Image (cartoon, rainbow, N blue to C red):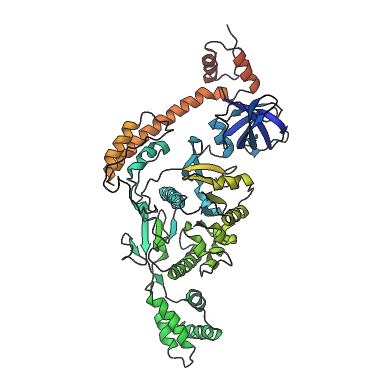
Amino acid sequence: MPEVVGFVHGEVKSTSFDIIVENKELAESGTYVKIHHEMYGWVLGQISFVRRYWDDKRGIERIIASVRVIGFKDAEGLVRLPKTPFKPEERVFKANQTLVRSILGLDSSGAAGLYIGTLEGEEDIKVYLDANKLIQKHLSVLAKTGAGKSYTVGVLLEELADKEVPCVVIDPHGEYYTLKIANDNPGDFDKFARFQVVPKAFLNVTEFTPNKSVNPTADVEFKLSDKNLDAREILDILPTKMTSGQEALLYQVINELKSGDYTLEYIIQQLQLSETNAKWGLIASIQSLLDNNIFSTEGTKLEEIVKKGQTSIVNLKGIKPELQELIVSKLSNDLFEARKQNKIPAFFFLVEEAHRFCPERGVGQAMSLGILRTIAAEGRKFGMGLGIVSQRPAKVDKNVLSQANTQIILKVTNPNDITAISKSLENFTPELEEVMKNLPLGTALITSENLERPVLTKIRVRRSKHGGAAVDLIKTRESSGGAPRQRIPMLGTKIDSNSGVVGMLKKRLVGTDTERRQDTAREKVHEIVEQKEQAAEEQKKADEWKENLTPDEIDFLEEHKVPGLGKRIRGKIWNGFKGFFVEDE
């Protein structure tokens, strides 16, 4: 039978109400509950917060939970809020998973579904994001330092790579090249079966870098093309601002060269023929671009960076910040123009450290700000989705931040950052602020168009190796060669029979990335997943008749318990009969 949480108490609204808790084990903040409405049937709600007080009159402790109503599905399948309040004293039950999936929009992954994690408190309910919405409506991933931001982005990139969605990632710190390496962390093997994933090295990931000596894992050396740049493009990427006289001189020289092909070196040679002294500052500035060794005549072709099914990591680790800005500015502009002309396929463009490349006014300046603003405003029309990642939301340009319709928010505590998020998030409430401040590591608050309301999500385990982990200054005894500490088994794991399989996974996978051993792990985890899904489906069928009962029908069964009644009722249902009750013979 559905478990009773409590009953409605005090003033009742159609959008919220309080309940006196009868089962305190079920009444936690964030718990999904259901309540029956005489006109609309079962309605889903969520406990927003719980408080306790002492009732002097009765001499007992009272627990009161406040519930925010999420809604019910109408005949057209749309989620609606009730138009009239619930009955006073109506009982409130713990919501079943079928209702939660249906109302929140989690009942189907779809071909474009990106598996991010599981619903907090309901590890059997998976949370998916729509890949099409990411390209059409943009994304932001926001968190304080150390809250799991790069790990979450890694999970997202794994899903996009698995779906073969073309991606370009601006990676200032070299955190994402490890997508090419399968996860062999022994501490993660217990989690593979729990999250129903297997280790994988994503071979459709290509790493680009301007400096292969710093980033030896890179597949391709990245260069910008300086061929036939117009005067405006050059002025936008110069490290120093030119005077009006120098700008005029540059326009004049380029007009003289437009009869044929030219490069930055040709421009310098032509400037040296000028008799004005204004040429020297301009020559020095252009020469500084060449000295950075990031330009070549042809440059890396955009068609190599954006390919169907390919994830391209632009690894800028070891590159000076001002050069990173230049690369992001020029590459963003070139990709946007190429996409407008349909020279490259539709793709997702993700920018790490967004507060550096599109800073809020008054916080800083970046030559890439203008083009990233344009992509945020217009990119969706041309099939160029934008993802911004930052640990300082308050320092990200508000025009860019507000364009992200999907937001993944991990722990944030800075008041300025919370204010910035609140301005970009629809239906922001004070309780969401408290949620953001107290999110545990590995849990995210996700808002999206395909979700009816923000949901707390446990981010799933990485399938590939995590490359953004912090460096420990003091090593543990185990990692430094001392006696290993006894490992404490994880609590809350529902799979009781997988300990042998997990042990086998560890034995076969630790220290290796071979395809044969990955296939073995994949088969074993798939076997567990199939067994778990089969058991869940059988349990769902067994419980379905109970969950659809009205409170009156529940009372009837409780008062007229007959041995074997439940089995006979289920037999009627399985044979196609409608109705929940049978007469005794």
Residue 22 higher or lower than 110, as above or below: above
At 35% across and 40% down in the image, what residue appears? 189
At 49% across and 67% down in the image, what residue appears? 333
Position of the N terminus by quadrant: top right
Q: Position of residue 310 (x, y in %)?
A: 40, 55
Say left or right for 244 vs 513: right
Say left or right for 41 vs 221: right
Q: Quadrant of residue 263?
A: bottom left
Which residue occupies the foreground of this view, 61 or 80? 61
Total number of numbered labels?
A: 0
Residue 4 higher or lower than 275, as above or below: above
Q: Quadrant of residue 265?
A: bottom left
At 41% across and 80% down in the image, what residue appears? 287
Residue 314 higher or lower than 79, as above or below: below
Instruction: Identify the residue at the far bottom of this view.
Output: 275
Which residue occupies the foreground of this view, 207 or 395? 395
Q: Position of residue 497 (x, y in %)?
A: 36, 28
Which residue occupies the foreground of this view, 162 or 560? 560
Asked if one can make out residue 153 in the rendered structure from this viewpoint, the answer is yes
Say left or right for 405 vs 470: right
At 43% across and 27% down in the image, what residue appears? 535
Asked if one can make out residue 447 in the rendered structure from this viewpoint, the answer is no
Q: Position of residue 281 (x, y in %)?
A: 47, 85
Position of the C terminus by quadrant: top right
Q: Position of residue 526 (x, y in %)?
A: 37, 35
